[in-house]
Image: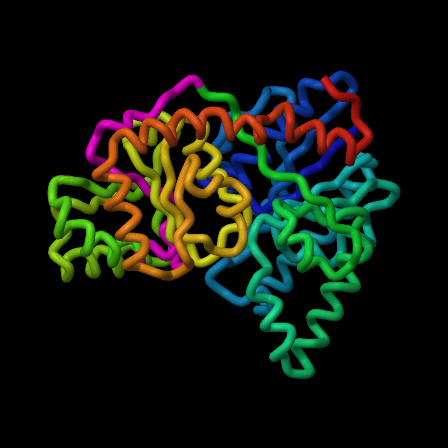
Amino acid sequence: MKIIFNTDQIHLHGGIEKVMATKANYWANLPDVEVFIVTTEQQNLPPRYQLDERVILIDFGVNYDRSKSYFSFENLKKAWLHYKKQKQLFKDLQPDVVISPNFNFDHYWLPFIKGNSKLIKERHSSRFYEVTQREDANFLKKLRFKINDWIEKKYDAIVVLNPDEASYVKTNNAVVIPNPVKISTLVADTSVKKVVAAGRISPVKNFGDLIKAWEFVYQEFPDWKLDIYGEDYLGTQTKLEQQIEEAGLQNVIHFKGSTENMLERMSQYSIYAMTSETECFPMVLLEALSIGLPIVSYDCPNGPRHIIDNGEDGVLVKHKEVKALATELKTMMRNPAERIRMQKLAKDNYLLFTTPKVMKQWQTLLNLPNV
């Protein structure tokens, strides 16, 4: 069996890239399975996450200009090149399964060049706000939604990460499979006075609310620190650093950049905090649970509530309630016994999402043998 992942790149830190590497490595170890990762703009950079030597990498070298509109003349020319190369590759390889884990130009033409392969779209971001967008759409936007629905109906399956997201699939081909997490022997140090957050430094991660909450936290806990890990996206970090300086928190809130050993770094903290606008099924929360790191998170649509057992291994806070977030952080900070209790439960609860358990669901979808 030949399995192809279609994506833009695998050199950046990100949940899609990490999950793709986990699945590719798992399948590459099965007998009679070949795995390919096909990219459009790898730019001769190495994969961010370790891949089995049997995983075959192919880069088309299309290199879309991400600073411009998808429909700019320059990118449309690149799209034609992308189409021709992809069509020829499928003709040569004759894949059995094609998996598209993000949104790219090829979303629209994959159903027409897939041949006899099983075609799967993965949704890694929430469609929560699309409900309102569909209701308020003008004629042209409604037409775009209809075209997207028509295209998605031609996929054999739309894989979503939680049951809430399945309700947003309009084409009756949704399959719910969560993200997998590796088994870890690390254990978080719940005694330290440090809180951690992580993710691409972008507006959707909404670190600004976490900084606002820390203004309230700082009044009672001036000796606690907050560290934020992740790569900057379009200058978002500069704006957040200005917010930190204006609040006088520059000595207690620090950006740590990206790291190759996020799990090891997280083990050096006693609380994980999340304030995203939306999250579909955030890998970082699974990783926090895997090392027993208690979580305080916004109940944002729709991922955290499907990972955190509220009051057991973490706390869900009403979305965008900054003061409530600060209150729960302070409660956790002043109660080390509660952090230890949650740690024990977290180490048990994350086992529902380990790689062997999740991959059994993929094996069923792809008709592959379980190992």
Task: Tell me where the magenta segment starts and ends, as one range.
Answer: 185-209
Left or right: residue 163 versus residue 206 is: right
Estimate the x, y position of residue 1 in percent, counting from the top left.
80, 27
Check the image and report above or below for 149 versus 3. below
Can residue 46 be spotted in the picture? no
Seen at 88% across and 42% down, the residue is 116
Coloration mode? rainbow
Left or right: residue 211 versus residue 143 is: left
Check the image and report above or below for 130 versus 124. below
Is residue 341 inside the magenta stretch?
A: no
Quarter of the figure with the C terminus: top right
Estimate the x, y position of residue 50 in percent, counting from the top left.
51, 25
Estimate the x, y position of residue 247 in percent, counting from the top left.
15, 59
Q: Nearer the viewer, residue 282 or 220?
A: 220
Q: Quadrant of residue 312?
A: top left
Can residue 303 be spotted in the picture? yes
Seen at 78% across and 51% down, the residue is 173
